[in-house]
Image (tube, rainbow, N blue to C red):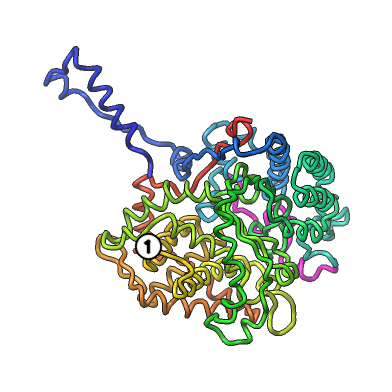
Amino acid sequence: MKNILPIVLAIAFVSCQNTEKPTTENEAANIEVVSPELTEAEKNLQKYETVKLTTDVSKLSENQKKMLPILIKVGQIMDGLFWRAAYGHKEEFLQSISDPKTRRFAEINYGPWDRLDGNKPFIDGVGEKPSGANYYPKDMTKEEFEAADLKDKNSLYTLIRRDSAGNLTSVPFHVAFKDELAKAAELLLEASYYADNEQLKNHLMFRAEALITDDFFKSDMAWMDMTDNQIDIICGPIETYEDQLFGNKASYEAYVLVKDMEWSKRLAKYATMLPELQMNLPVDAKYKAEKPGTDSQLAAFDVVYYAGDCNAGSKTIAVNLPNDENIQLEKGTRRSQLKNAMQAKFDKILLPIAAELIDESQRDYINFDAFFANTMFHEVAHGLGIKNTLDGKGTVREALKEHASALEEGKADILGLYMITQLHAKGEIEGDLKSYYTTFMASIFRSIRFGTSSAHGKANMIRFNFFKDQGVFNRSEDGKYTIDYDKMNDAMNALSAKILKLQGDGDYEGVAKLVAEETVIREDLASDLARLAELGIPVDVVFEQGTEVLGL
Protein backbone atom coordinates (compact mmCIF):
# COMPACT_ATOMS: atom_id res chain seq x y z
CA MET A 1 0.00 0.00 0.00
CA LYS A 2 1.28 3.46 -0.79
CA ASN A 3 2.39 5.16 2.41
CA ILE A 4 -0.11 7.91 3.30
CA LEU A 5 1.93 9.21 6.24
CA PRO A 6 3.92 11.75 4.13
CA ILE A 7 0.62 13.12 2.78
CA VAL A 8 -0.79 13.53 6.28
CA LEU A 9 2.40 15.26 7.45
CA ALA A 10 2.39 17.50 4.41
CA ILE A 11 -1.19 18.59 5.12
CA ALA A 12 -0.30 19.25 8.74
CA PHE A 13 2.78 21.22 7.66
CA VAL A 14 0.76 23.41 5.28
CA SER A 15 -1.81 24.05 8.02
CA CYS A 16 0.94 25.20 10.39
CA GLN A 17 2.40 27.54 7.77
CA ASN A 18 -0.96 29.27 7.29
CA THR A 19 -1.48 30.23 10.96
CA GLU A 20 -0.07 33.76 10.45
CA LYS A 21 -2.66 34.62 7.81
CA PRO A 22 -5.89 32.62 8.25
CA THR A 23 -7.96 31.92 5.17
CA THR A 24 -11.24 33.84 5.22
CA GLU A 25 -14.55 32.08 4.66
CA ASN A 26 -14.98 33.74 1.25
CA GLU A 27 -11.43 32.86 0.20
CA ALA A 28 -11.98 29.24 1.27
CA ALA A 29 -15.12 29.04 -0.83
CA ASN A 30 -13.11 30.03 -3.92
CA ILE A 31 -10.33 27.47 -3.44
CA GLU A 32 -10.64 24.55 -5.84
CA VAL A 33 -8.73 21.41 -4.86
CA VAL A 34 -7.51 19.82 -8.08
CA SER A 35 -6.24 16.25 -8.03
CA PRO A 36 -3.67 15.97 -10.83
CA GLU A 37 -4.55 13.43 -13.49
CA LEU A 38 -1.92 10.72 -13.76
CA THR A 39 -0.46 9.86 -17.14
CA GLU A 40 -0.59 6.28 -18.33
CA ALA A 41 3.13 5.89 -17.63
CA GLU A 42 2.67 7.19 -14.06
CA LYS A 43 -0.17 4.71 -13.48
CA ASN A 44 2.03 1.93 -14.80
CA LEU A 45 4.92 2.84 -12.51
CA GLN A 46 2.56 2.78 -9.52
CA LYS A 47 2.38 -0.99 -9.95
CA TYR A 48 5.85 -1.18 -8.40
CA GLU A 49 7.19 -0.23 -4.97
CA THR A 50 10.86 0.72 -4.82
CA VAL A 51 12.94 -1.21 -2.27
CA LYS A 52 16.64 -0.92 -1.39
CA LEU A 53 18.60 -4.18 -1.52
CA THR A 54 21.06 -4.16 1.35
CA THR A 55 22.80 -6.48 3.78
CA ASP A 56 25.08 -6.08 6.80
CA VAL A 57 28.44 -5.83 5.04
CA SER A 58 30.22 -5.50 8.42
CA LYS A 59 29.86 -9.28 8.76
CA LEU A 60 31.96 -9.81 5.61
CA SER A 61 35.72 -10.19 5.31
CA GLU A 62 37.76 -7.69 3.30
CA ASN A 63 38.13 -10.23 0.48
CA GLN A 64 34.37 -10.82 0.42
CA LYS A 65 33.79 -7.06 0.18
CA LYS A 66 36.14 -6.98 -2.81
CA MET A 67 34.28 -9.87 -4.47
CA LEU A 68 30.81 -8.34 -4.40
CA PRO A 69 31.47 -5.45 -6.86
CA ILE A 70 33.10 -7.90 -9.29
CA LEU A 71 30.13 -10.27 -9.11
CA ILE A 72 27.73 -7.36 -9.62
CA LYS A 73 29.59 -6.58 -12.87
CA VAL A 74 28.93 -10.17 -13.95
CA GLY A 75 25.26 -9.56 -13.19
CA GLN A 76 25.26 -6.46 -15.36
CA ILE A 77 26.54 -8.53 -18.30
CA MET A 78 23.82 -11.14 -17.72
CA ASP A 79 21.30 -8.29 -17.71
CA GLY A 80 22.43 -7.14 -21.13
CA LEU A 81 22.25 -10.67 -22.52
CA PHE A 82 18.69 -11.07 -21.27
CA TRP A 83 17.76 -7.86 -23.08
CA ARG A 84 19.19 -9.36 -26.29
CA ALA A 85 17.15 -12.56 -25.97
CA ALA A 86 13.93 -10.97 -24.68
CA TYR A 87 13.75 -8.02 -27.06
CA GLY A 88 16.90 -7.09 -28.94
CA HIS A 89 19.35 -4.24 -28.52
CA LYS A 90 18.56 -2.22 -25.41
CA GLU A 91 20.17 1.18 -25.95
CA GLU A 92 18.71 1.91 -29.38
CA PHE A 93 15.23 1.02 -28.12
CA LEU A 94 15.42 3.07 -24.91
CA GLN A 95 16.83 6.12 -26.71
CA SER A 96 13.79 6.08 -29.00
CA ILE A 97 11.46 6.75 -26.02
CA SER A 98 11.20 10.47 -25.25
CA ASP A 99 9.12 10.30 -22.06
CA PRO A 100 11.38 9.41 -19.09
CA LYS A 101 8.59 7.64 -17.16
CA THR A 102 7.69 5.45 -20.14
CA ARG A 103 11.42 4.75 -20.59
CA ARG A 104 11.67 3.68 -16.96
CA PHE A 105 8.69 1.36 -17.36
CA ALA A 106 10.34 -0.14 -20.44
CA GLU A 107 13.50 -0.77 -18.41
CA ILE A 108 11.48 -2.63 -15.76
CA ASN A 109 9.80 -4.76 -18.43
CA TYR A 110 12.88 -5.32 -20.62
CA GLY A 111 10.90 -4.17 -23.62
CA PRO A 112 7.64 -2.46 -24.68
CA TRP A 113 5.27 -5.09 -23.23
CA ASP A 114 3.75 -4.96 -19.75
CA ARG A 115 4.70 -8.22 -18.05
CA LEU A 116 2.08 -7.70 -15.32
CA ASP A 117 -0.72 -7.18 -17.85
CA GLY A 118 -0.51 -10.20 -20.12
CA ASN A 119 2.38 -8.67 -22.13
CA LYS A 120 0.09 -5.91 -23.39
CA PRO A 121 2.08 -3.35 -25.43
CA PHE A 122 2.38 0.07 -23.75
CA ILE A 123 4.09 1.76 -26.70
CA ASP A 124 2.08 2.42 -29.87
CA GLY A 125 2.95 0.50 -32.98
CA VAL A 126 5.08 -2.29 -31.50
CA GLY A 127 2.45 -5.02 -31.93
CA GLU A 128 2.08 -8.14 -29.82
CA LYS A 129 5.06 -9.67 -28.08
CA PRO A 130 6.35 -12.72 -30.02
CA SER A 131 5.69 -15.89 -28.02
CA GLY A 132 9.25 -16.97 -28.67
CA ALA A 133 10.66 -13.57 -27.67
CA ASN A 134 13.88 -13.01 -29.65
CA TYR A 135 15.00 -16.64 -29.57
CA TYR A 136 13.40 -17.42 -32.96
CA PRO A 137 12.80 -15.54 -36.22
CA LYS A 138 9.64 -13.44 -35.91
CA ASP A 139 8.16 -14.98 -39.07
CA MET A 140 8.82 -18.60 -38.04
CA THR A 141 5.83 -20.89 -37.51
CA LYS A 142 5.68 -23.80 -35.09
CA GLU A 143 5.27 -26.16 -38.02
CA GLU A 144 8.40 -24.85 -39.72
CA PHE A 145 10.41 -25.31 -36.53
CA GLU A 146 9.14 -28.84 -35.92
CA ALA A 147 9.93 -29.84 -39.50
CA ALA A 148 13.45 -28.38 -39.40
CA ASP A 149 16.27 -30.96 -39.37
CA LEU A 150 18.49 -29.33 -36.73
CA LYS A 151 19.89 -31.65 -34.10
CA ASP A 152 20.27 -28.98 -31.43
CA LYS A 153 17.13 -26.94 -32.18
CA ASN A 154 15.59 -27.94 -28.83
CA SER A 155 18.75 -27.14 -26.89
CA LEU A 156 18.40 -24.77 -23.99
CA TYR A 157 21.44 -22.89 -25.25
CA THR A 158 20.83 -22.07 -28.93
CA LEU A 159 19.23 -19.21 -30.83
CA ILE A 160 17.25 -20.08 -33.95
CA ARG A 161 18.03 -17.81 -36.88
CA ARG A 162 17.82 -17.82 -40.71
CA ASP A 163 20.83 -18.38 -42.91
CA SER A 164 21.52 -16.50 -46.13
CA ALA A 165 19.16 -18.83 -48.01
CA GLY A 166 16.32 -18.18 -45.53
CA ASN A 167 16.53 -21.62 -43.91
CA LEU A 168 16.42 -22.12 -40.16
CA THR A 169 19.76 -22.59 -38.46
CA SER A 170 20.89 -22.74 -34.84
CA VAL A 171 23.53 -20.56 -33.20
CA PRO A 172 24.95 -21.61 -29.80
CA PHE A 173 24.76 -18.97 -27.08
CA HIS A 174 28.52 -19.10 -26.56
CA VAL A 175 28.96 -18.15 -30.23
CA ALA A 176 26.19 -15.53 -30.44
CA PHE A 177 27.35 -13.79 -27.25
CA LYS A 178 31.06 -14.63 -27.43
CA ASP A 179 32.51 -11.26 -26.38
CA GLU A 180 30.13 -10.63 -23.48
CA LEU A 181 30.56 -14.16 -22.12
CA ALA A 182 34.35 -13.93 -22.35
CA LYS A 183 34.24 -10.77 -20.21
CA ALA A 184 31.88 -12.41 -17.67
CA ALA A 185 34.18 -15.44 -17.44
CA GLU A 186 37.16 -13.17 -16.88
CA LEU A 187 35.34 -11.43 -14.02
CA LEU A 188 34.40 -14.75 -12.39
CA LEU A 189 38.05 -15.80 -12.45
CA GLU A 190 39.00 -12.46 -10.93
CA ALA A 191 36.43 -12.98 -8.16
CA SER A 192 37.76 -16.48 -7.52
CA TYR A 193 41.11 -14.91 -6.59
CA TYR A 194 39.42 -13.31 -3.54
CA ALA A 195 37.44 -16.42 -2.55
CA ASP A 196 38.56 -17.59 0.90
CA ASN A 197 36.20 -20.55 0.59
CA GLU A 198 37.67 -23.35 -1.58
CA GLN A 199 34.26 -24.67 -2.62
CA LEU A 200 33.26 -21.22 -3.86
CA LYS A 201 36.59 -20.79 -5.62
CA ASN A 202 36.08 -24.07 -7.51
CA HIS A 203 32.56 -23.15 -8.50
CA LEU A 204 33.56 -19.73 -9.83
CA MET A 205 36.32 -21.25 -11.96
CA PHE A 206 34.01 -23.97 -13.32
CA ARG A 207 31.26 -21.42 -13.98
CA ALA A 208 33.67 -19.24 -15.93
CA GLU A 209 34.42 -22.21 -18.18
CA ALA A 210 30.73 -23.09 -18.49
CA LEU A 211 29.74 -19.65 -19.73
CA ILE A 212 32.07 -19.89 -22.73
CA THR A 213 31.19 -23.51 -23.59
CA ASP A 214 27.46 -23.82 -22.72
CA ASP A 215 28.33 -26.96 -20.74
CA PHE A 216 27.03 -26.32 -17.22
CA PHE A 217 27.04 -29.81 -15.69
CA LYS A 218 30.42 -29.59 -13.93
CA SER A 219 29.80 -26.12 -12.52
CA ASP A 220 26.30 -27.09 -11.34
CA MET A 221 27.73 -30.11 -9.55
CA ALA A 222 30.40 -27.91 -7.95
CA TRP A 223 27.69 -25.45 -6.92
CA MET A 224 25.79 -28.27 -5.21
CA ASP A 225 28.97 -29.20 -3.30
CA MET A 226 29.14 -25.76 -1.68
CA THR A 227 27.89 -25.82 1.91
CA ASP A 228 29.67 -23.25 4.08
CA ASN A 229 30.19 -20.36 1.66
CA GLN A 230 28.88 -16.96 2.72
CA ILE A 231 29.01 -15.33 -0.74
CA ASP A 232 27.23 -16.86 -3.72
CA ILE A 233 26.34 -16.01 -7.29
CA ILE A 234 23.79 -17.69 -9.52
CA CYS A 235 24.45 -16.68 -13.12
CA GLY A 236 23.97 -17.92 -16.66
CA PRO A 237 21.13 -19.09 -18.90
CA ILE A 238 18.81 -20.84 -16.44
CA GLU A 239 14.99 -20.57 -16.58
CA THR A 240 12.82 -21.08 -19.68
CA TYR A 241 9.88 -18.82 -18.77
CA GLU A 242 10.65 -16.29 -21.51
CA ASP A 243 10.24 -18.83 -24.31
CA GLN A 244 6.45 -19.16 -24.38
CA LEU A 245 6.50 -20.73 -27.84
CA PHE A 246 8.13 -24.04 -26.90
CA GLY A 247 9.63 -23.54 -23.44
CA ASN A 248 12.98 -24.67 -24.84
CA LYS A 249 15.29 -21.70 -24.47
CA ALA A 250 17.02 -20.65 -21.25
CA SER A 251 17.35 -17.00 -20.27
CA TYR A 252 20.37 -15.24 -18.80
CA GLU A 253 20.05 -13.94 -15.26
CA ALA A 254 22.06 -13.39 -12.10
CA TYR A 255 21.60 -13.17 -8.36
CA VAL A 256 24.42 -11.96 -6.12
CA LEU A 257 23.82 -13.36 -2.64
CA VAL A 258 25.04 -13.10 0.95
CA LYS A 259 24.08 -16.10 3.09
CA ASP A 260 22.35 -15.68 6.44
CA MET A 261 24.33 -18.38 8.22
CA GLU A 262 22.04 -18.66 11.27
CA TRP A 263 18.80 -18.93 9.31
CA SER A 264 20.38 -21.47 7.00
CA LYS A 265 21.35 -23.74 9.91
CA ARG A 266 17.74 -23.72 11.11
CA LEU A 267 16.46 -24.81 7.69
CA ALA A 268 18.95 -27.59 6.97
CA LYS A 269 16.94 -30.45 8.50
CA TYR A 270 13.95 -30.22 6.15
CA ALA A 271 15.81 -31.33 3.02
CA THR A 272 16.54 -34.74 4.61
CA MET A 273 12.80 -35.44 4.86
CA LEU A 274 12.14 -35.43 1.09
CA PRO A 275 12.21 -39.24 0.51
CA GLU A 276 9.59 -39.89 3.20
CA LEU A 277 7.38 -37.07 1.96
CA GLN A 278 7.68 -38.39 -1.61
CA MET A 279 6.44 -41.80 -0.49
CA ASN A 280 3.35 -40.25 1.14
CA LEU A 281 2.22 -38.12 -1.81
CA PRO A 282 -1.57 -38.44 -2.41
CA VAL A 283 -1.25 -40.14 -5.80
CA ASP A 284 -0.83 -43.64 -7.28
CA ALA A 285 2.54 -45.24 -6.55
CA LYS A 286 3.77 -45.07 -10.16
CA TYR A 287 3.65 -41.25 -10.07
CA LYS A 288 6.00 -41.11 -7.08
CA ALA A 289 8.40 -43.95 -7.90
CA GLU A 290 11.36 -41.65 -8.48
CA LYS A 291 13.55 -41.10 -5.45
CA PRO A 292 14.51 -37.45 -4.85
CA GLY A 293 18.18 -36.68 -4.24
CA THR A 294 19.13 -36.50 -0.58
CA ASP A 295 21.87 -33.87 -0.95
CA SER A 296 19.24 -31.16 -1.27
CA GLN A 297 20.05 -28.00 0.65
CA LEU A 298 18.04 -25.19 2.16
CA ALA A 299 19.60 -21.80 2.78
CA ALA A 300 18.49 -18.22 3.46
CA PHE A 301 20.17 -15.27 1.76
CA ASP A 302 20.08 -11.53 1.46
CA VAL A 303 20.05 -10.85 -2.26
CA VAL A 304 22.07 -7.75 -3.12
CA TYR A 305 21.73 -7.76 -6.92
CA TYR A 306 19.14 -9.00 -9.41
CA ALA A 307 19.78 -9.09 -13.15
CA GLY A 308 18.08 -10.39 -16.28
CA ASP A 309 15.22 -12.85 -16.22
CA CYS A 310 14.71 -12.84 -12.44
CA ASN A 311 14.51 -9.03 -12.50
CA ALA A 312 11.95 -8.77 -15.31
CA GLY A 313 8.45 -7.81 -14.19
CA SER A 314 7.58 -9.83 -11.07
CA LYS A 315 10.67 -10.55 -8.97
CA THR A 316 11.75 -13.98 -7.79
CA ILE A 317 11.93 -14.38 -4.00
CA ALA A 318 13.15 -17.99 -3.83
CA VAL A 319 15.22 -20.15 -6.17
CA ASN A 320 15.30 -23.91 -6.69
CA LEU A 321 18.26 -25.07 -8.83
CA PRO A 322 19.85 -26.71 -10.78
CA ASN A 323 17.12 -27.45 -13.34
CA ASP A 324 19.07 -30.39 -14.83
CA GLU A 325 16.89 -33.44 -14.11
CA ASN A 326 19.95 -35.73 -13.90
CA ILE A 327 21.55 -33.59 -11.20
CA GLN A 328 18.24 -33.38 -9.36
CA LEU A 329 17.95 -37.16 -9.19
CA GLU A 330 21.62 -37.67 -8.28
CA LYS A 331 22.21 -34.81 -5.83
CA GLY A 332 18.91 -32.98 -5.41
CA THR A 333 18.73 -29.21 -5.58
CA ARG A 334 19.53 -26.14 -3.52
CA ARG A 335 16.60 -24.04 -2.36
CA SER A 336 17.70 -20.47 -1.79
CA GLN A 337 15.29 -18.23 0.14
CA LEU A 338 15.83 -14.53 -0.62
CA LYS A 339 14.85 -13.28 2.80
CA ASN A 340 15.20 -9.51 2.40
CA ALA A 341 13.23 -9.45 -0.87
CA MET A 342 10.63 -11.75 0.67
CA GLN A 343 10.18 -9.45 3.67
CA ALA A 344 9.71 -6.46 1.36
CA LYS A 345 6.94 -8.19 -0.59
CA PHE A 346 5.23 -9.31 2.62
CA ASP A 347 5.27 -5.82 4.16
CA LYS A 348 4.54 -3.75 1.06
CA ILE A 349 2.11 -6.03 -0.79
CA LEU A 350 0.76 -9.08 1.06
CA LEU A 351 -0.34 -7.33 4.28
CA PRO A 352 -2.25 -4.56 2.42
CA ILE A 353 -3.93 -7.18 0.19
CA ALA A 354 -4.96 -9.22 3.24
CA ALA A 355 -6.39 -6.12 4.95
CA GLU A 356 -8.64 -5.56 1.94
CA LEU A 357 -9.63 -9.09 0.88
CA ILE A 358 -9.36 -11.48 3.85
CA ASP A 359 -12.24 -11.48 6.35
CA GLU A 360 -11.37 -9.79 9.63
CA SER A 361 -12.12 -13.00 11.56
CA GLN A 362 -9.17 -14.76 9.86
CA ARG A 363 -6.83 -11.86 9.11
CA ASP A 364 -4.74 -12.27 12.28
CA TYR A 365 -3.58 -15.69 11.06
CA ILE A 366 -1.38 -14.02 8.44
CA ASN A 367 2.28 -13.61 9.43
CA PHE A 368 5.75 -13.50 7.89
CA ASP A 369 6.90 -16.84 9.34
CA ALA A 370 4.05 -18.57 7.49
CA PHE A 371 4.83 -16.62 4.30
CA PHE A 372 8.50 -17.58 4.55
CA ALA A 373 7.62 -21.25 5.15
CA ASN A 374 5.11 -21.38 2.29
CA THR A 375 7.68 -19.88 -0.07
CA MET A 376 10.45 -22.15 1.18
CA PHE A 377 8.44 -25.35 0.88
CA HIS A 378 7.31 -24.30 -2.60
CA GLU A 379 10.96 -24.53 -3.59
CA VAL A 380 11.49 -27.80 -1.71
CA ALA A 381 8.43 -29.26 -3.41
CA HIS A 382 10.05 -28.84 -6.84
CA GLY A 383 12.07 -31.92 -5.80
CA LEU A 384 8.95 -34.02 -5.24
CA GLY A 385 6.84 -35.85 -7.80
CA ILE A 386 8.19 -36.98 -11.14
CA LYS A 387 10.81 -35.65 -13.56
CA ASN A 388 10.46 -38.21 -16.40
CA THR A 389 7.26 -39.29 -18.10
CA LEU A 390 6.01 -42.80 -17.44
CA ASP A 391 6.00 -43.76 -21.13
CA GLY A 392 9.79 -43.36 -21.31
CA LYS A 393 9.60 -40.69 -23.99
CA GLY A 394 11.58 -38.07 -22.14
CA THR A 395 11.30 -35.51 -19.38
CA VAL A 396 8.11 -33.84 -18.22
CA ARG A 397 9.54 -30.53 -19.46
CA GLU A 398 10.01 -31.89 -22.96
CA ALA A 399 6.54 -33.46 -23.04
CA LEU A 400 4.59 -30.44 -21.80
CA LYS A 401 6.57 -27.87 -23.82
CA GLU A 402 5.39 -24.28 -23.29
CA HIS A 403 3.00 -25.38 -20.50
CA ALA A 404 5.67 -27.17 -18.47
CA SER A 405 6.72 -24.15 -16.40
CA ALA A 406 3.20 -23.13 -15.36
CA LEU A 407 2.27 -26.67 -14.29
CA GLU A 408 5.57 -27.15 -12.45
CA GLU A 409 5.03 -23.91 -10.52
CA GLY A 410 1.49 -25.05 -9.71
CA LYS A 411 2.85 -28.37 -8.48
CA ALA A 412 5.42 -26.69 -6.27
CA ASP A 413 2.81 -24.38 -4.75
CA ILE A 414 0.31 -27.09 -3.83
CA LEU A 415 2.88 -29.71 -2.77
CA GLY A 416 4.59 -27.07 -0.64
CA LEU A 417 1.33 -26.68 1.27
CA TYR A 418 1.02 -30.48 1.43
CA MET A 419 4.51 -30.68 2.95
CA ILE A 420 3.64 -28.09 5.59
CA THR A 421 0.51 -30.06 6.49
CA GLN A 422 2.47 -33.30 6.81
CA LEU A 423 5.34 -31.78 8.80
CA HIS A 424 2.95 -29.91 11.09
CA ALA A 425 1.19 -33.19 11.93
CA LYS A 426 4.59 -34.67 12.83
CA GLY A 427 5.46 -31.71 15.07
CA GLU A 428 8.36 -30.68 12.79
CA ILE A 429 7.08 -27.15 12.25
CA GLU A 430 5.45 -24.88 14.80
CA GLY A 431 2.53 -22.48 14.70
CA ASP A 432 -1.15 -22.76 13.90
CA LEU A 433 -1.84 -24.62 10.65
CA LYS A 434 -4.51 -22.02 9.92
CA SER A 435 -1.74 -19.41 9.68
CA TYR A 436 -0.06 -21.31 6.83
CA TYR A 437 -3.40 -21.88 5.05
CA THR A 438 -4.63 -18.27 5.40
CA THR A 439 -1.29 -16.77 4.37
CA PHE A 440 -1.23 -19.19 1.40
CA MET A 441 -4.69 -18.00 0.31
CA ALA A 442 -3.77 -14.33 0.63
CA SER A 443 -0.62 -14.95 -1.40
CA ILE A 444 -2.70 -16.37 -4.26
CA PHE A 445 -4.18 -12.89 -4.73
CA ARG A 446 -0.66 -11.45 -4.71
CA SER A 447 0.61 -13.77 -7.44
CA ILE A 448 -2.51 -13.65 -9.63
CA ARG A 449 -1.70 -10.00 -10.17
CA PHE A 450 1.48 -11.01 -12.03
CA GLY A 451 -0.79 -11.76 -14.99
CA THR A 452 -1.37 -14.87 -17.05
CA SER A 453 1.69 -14.22 -19.21
CA SER A 454 3.66 -15.35 -16.15
CA ALA A 455 4.05 -19.04 -15.27
CA HIS A 456 3.48 -18.15 -11.62
CA GLY A 457 0.41 -16.09 -12.49
CA LYS A 458 -1.09 -18.97 -14.49
CA ALA A 459 -0.38 -21.44 -11.69
CA ASN A 460 -2.09 -19.25 -9.11
CA MET A 461 -5.09 -18.59 -11.35
CA ILE A 462 -5.59 -22.34 -11.89
CA ARG A 463 -5.41 -22.94 -8.15
CA PHE A 464 -7.80 -20.10 -7.33
CA ASN A 465 -10.47 -21.43 -9.70
CA PHE A 466 -9.92 -25.01 -8.50
CA PHE A 467 -10.31 -23.89 -4.87
CA LYS A 468 -13.43 -21.91 -5.76
CA ASP A 469 -15.03 -24.89 -7.49
CA GLN A 470 -14.20 -27.07 -4.45
CA GLY A 471 -15.85 -24.60 -2.04
CA VAL A 472 -12.58 -23.78 -0.26
CA PHE A 473 -13.59 -20.18 0.36
CA ASN A 474 -16.68 -18.02 0.60
CA ARG A 475 -16.83 -14.46 -0.70
CA SER A 476 -19.09 -11.95 1.01
CA GLU A 477 -21.03 -9.29 -0.87
CA ASP A 478 -18.42 -6.70 0.07
CA GLY A 479 -15.59 -8.83 -1.34
CA LYS A 480 -14.13 -10.38 1.82
CA TYR A 481 -12.94 -14.01 1.71
CA THR A 482 -13.41 -16.61 4.45
CA ILE A 483 -11.61 -19.96 4.23
CA ASP A 484 -13.07 -23.39 4.99
CA TYR A 485 -9.89 -25.07 6.30
CA ASP A 486 -11.19 -28.65 6.06
CA LYS A 487 -12.18 -28.20 2.41
CA MET A 488 -8.81 -26.56 1.72
CA ASN A 489 -7.04 -29.70 2.92
CA ASP A 490 -9.21 -31.91 0.68
CA ALA A 491 -8.75 -29.64 -2.33
CA MET A 492 -4.99 -29.57 -1.73
CA ASN A 493 -4.82 -33.36 -2.01
CA ALA A 494 -7.09 -33.48 -5.06
CA LEU A 495 -5.14 -30.83 -6.98
CA SER A 496 -1.82 -32.44 -6.03
CA ALA A 497 -2.96 -35.76 -7.52
CA LYS A 498 -4.30 -34.09 -10.67
CA ILE A 499 -1.07 -32.22 -11.41
CA LEU A 500 1.21 -35.18 -10.66
CA LYS A 501 -0.81 -37.39 -12.98
CA LEU A 502 -0.72 -34.83 -15.81
CA GLN A 503 3.05 -34.58 -15.44
CA GLY A 504 3.69 -38.32 -15.21
CA ASP A 505 1.49 -39.00 -18.23
CA GLY A 506 3.16 -36.21 -20.21
CA ASP A 507 -0.40 -35.18 -21.09
CA TYR A 508 0.18 -32.09 -23.24
CA GLU A 509 -3.46 -31.88 -24.41
CA GLY A 510 -4.76 -32.26 -20.86
CA VAL A 511 -2.51 -29.50 -19.54
CA ALA A 512 -3.36 -27.21 -22.47
CA LYS A 513 -7.06 -27.70 -21.69
CA LEU A 514 -6.47 -26.96 -18.00
CA VAL A 515 -4.57 -23.75 -18.81
CA ALA A 516 -7.19 -22.60 -21.35
CA GLU A 517 -10.16 -23.20 -19.05
CA GLU A 518 -8.82 -22.36 -15.60
CA THR A 519 -6.70 -19.24 -16.17
CA VAL A 520 -9.81 -17.16 -16.84
CA ILE A 521 -10.30 -14.31 -14.36
CA ARG A 522 -13.98 -14.40 -13.46
CA GLU A 523 -16.12 -11.33 -12.72
CA ASP A 524 -15.95 -11.29 -8.89
CA LEU A 525 -12.18 -11.73 -8.85
CA ALA A 526 -11.73 -9.06 -11.52
CA SER A 527 -13.59 -6.52 -9.37
CA ASP A 528 -11.51 -7.49 -6.32
CA LEU A 529 -8.25 -7.03 -8.22
CA ALA A 530 -9.50 -3.67 -9.52
CA ARG A 531 -10.09 -2.59 -5.90
CA LEU A 532 -6.49 -3.39 -5.04
CA ALA A 533 -5.29 -1.27 -7.96
CA GLU A 534 -7.58 1.63 -7.00
CA LEU A 535 -6.18 1.57 -3.48
CA GLY A 536 -2.66 1.93 -4.89
CA ILE A 537 -1.45 -1.41 -3.56
CA PRO A 538 1.63 -2.24 -5.65
CA VAL A 539 1.75 -5.43 -7.66
CA ASP A 540 5.46 -5.97 -7.22
CA VAL A 541 8.76 -4.35 -6.29
CA VAL A 542 11.70 -2.78 -8.10
CA PHE A 543 15.11 -2.35 -6.58
CA GLU A 544 17.68 0.27 -5.78
CA GLN A 545 20.74 -1.95 -5.89
CA GLY A 546 24.45 -2.06 -6.52
CA THR A 547 27.75 -1.20 -4.90
CA GLU A 548 26.73 2.32 -3.88
CA VAL A 549 23.59 1.07 -2.11
CA LEU A 550 25.75 -1.46 -0.26
CA GLY A 551 28.24 1.24 0.69
CA LEU A 552 31.12 -0.55 -1.05
Left or right: 274, with 19 as reference point: right
User: Which part of the image, by quadrant, shows the N terminus?
Assistant: top left
| Nearer to the camera, 90 or 408 | 408
User: Start and end of the magenta stretch?
Assistant: 125-149
The furthest residue to the right: 165
Work out whether residue 137 or residue 511 is closer to the camera in this orientation and state it: 511
Rendering quarter of residue 269 = bottom right
* x 51%, y 60%: residue: 375
Q: Is residue 316 visible?
A: no
Which residue in the structure is indicated by mark 1? 525
Q: Secondary structure at mark 1?
A: helix
Is residue 526 visible to us here? yes
What amino acid type should be assigned to the residue bearing mark 1?
Leu
Number of numbered discs present?
1
Frontmost residue, 224 versus 118: 224
**Tag 1: Cα neighbours inside 10 Å, few (<14), some, or many (≥20)?**
some
Kindly report the secondary structure that dominates the magenta region of the rendered protein: loop
Residue 481 against residue 92 in the figure, above or below: below
| Residue at (33% x, 73% y) in the render | 484
